[in-house]
Amino acid sequence: MRTHQRLLQWCIGAAVVVCTAAHVLIAQDHRAEDAQTTFKSQTDVVVLHVNVFDRRSDAVPNLPQSAFHVIEDNKRQTISLFNSADVPVAVGLVLDNSGSMIARNHMVLIGGEAFGKTARPEDELFTIHFNEHVQFGLPDTVPFTNRQSLLHAALARYRPGGRTALHDAVIAGLEHLERATNQKRVLVLLSDGDDNASRHSEDEMIARARASDTIIYTVSNATRRVGLDGDPGLLRKLADVTGGLAYFPNTDEKVVESLDEVAGNIRRGYTIGYVSTNPARDGTFRAVKVMALVPGRAGLTVRTRDGYTAPLSP
């Protein structure tokens, strides 16, 4: 009889564990389906993709969970999810294809191919080329690829010319990433930051970027040697609100080096999750800060998105 009772208790306990695990997986699935960072489960996990850099701007790997501290609206949070392994990524290259790029298209081809060379079988890559029009480089029937040959064809598909619809292109990239299956999502924007042809405003673009889980890296192609600086403030802002980095190379060769560095860094980093101490489902913006504190390692810089929008009660 006692054996039977112990067996029954074990089965009940196992069922609870399975149900709890299923509940967490369902919560994560719901989160993946919603780019507005709203969650369906009663235990809402906020997931952050975090990168750590040293003073030389090199990525810092292999830090333990104990090194990280998450602050939401000035309140310490308890980390419940941590992963430091490289993960497959969905990456969109959003490339200036306006008239200013007519003599510089080789730079786009060489820099963009770095992403094809480092692609893994699970990765999902695509390109967007923008002047006054926003066009996808891959065929309509191929939303993503990991094949270097297809990426090369996409990079070379359009001739430069025309004006610049930067805001529209970034929003199109964010929307396309919603179709990806990989949960780490990245946009790499090659632009000087200027816009003279978009239907969407800068504020709309920033709001869409902040509401997404996408990390945006910006690489300036401004020709500062002839006094054309573009809008570096916008490029920094896009990177800052999403946890990316802004690069400001001063030659075409340095642009290629910057793109190559981004291609090497996008899989590195940490995934951190926590359940907020604020249970209100009020649709407000919650400011988030992550710190990495390691004895003997001063000067570490942590990059992640600057916050998220809480869900609304149904």
Image: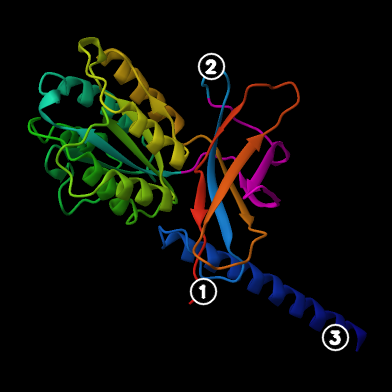
Question: Mark 1 vs mark 2: which is more N-terminal?
Answer: 2
Q: Which of the two residues, 219 or 260, is positioned nearer the viewer here?
A: 219
Disc 3 residue crowd, few under 14, some 14–19, many 20+, Cα 10 Å:
few
Mark 3 vs mark 1, foreground winner is 1
For the question of whether residue 118 can be seen, the reply is no
Q: Amino acid under label 2?
A: Arg
**Residue at the image position 51 percent from the left and 74 percent from the top:** 313
Give x and y (percent) for residue 171.
28, 48
Q: CA–CA distance between discs 1 and 2?
A: 45 Å
**Quadrant hosting residue 157:** top left
**Quadrant hosting residue 170:** top left
Specify the segment rendered in magenta: 59-87
Coloring scheme of the render?
rainbow
Mark 1 vs mark 2, foreground winner is 1
Give the residue pinned by disc 1.
Answer: 313
Q: Which mark is residue 4?
A: 3
Give x and y (percent) for residue 129.
18, 38
Q: CA–CA distance between discs 3 and 2?
A: 63 Å
**Residue at the image position 45 percent from the left and 30 percent from the top:** 265
Give the residue pinned by disc 2.
Answer: 56
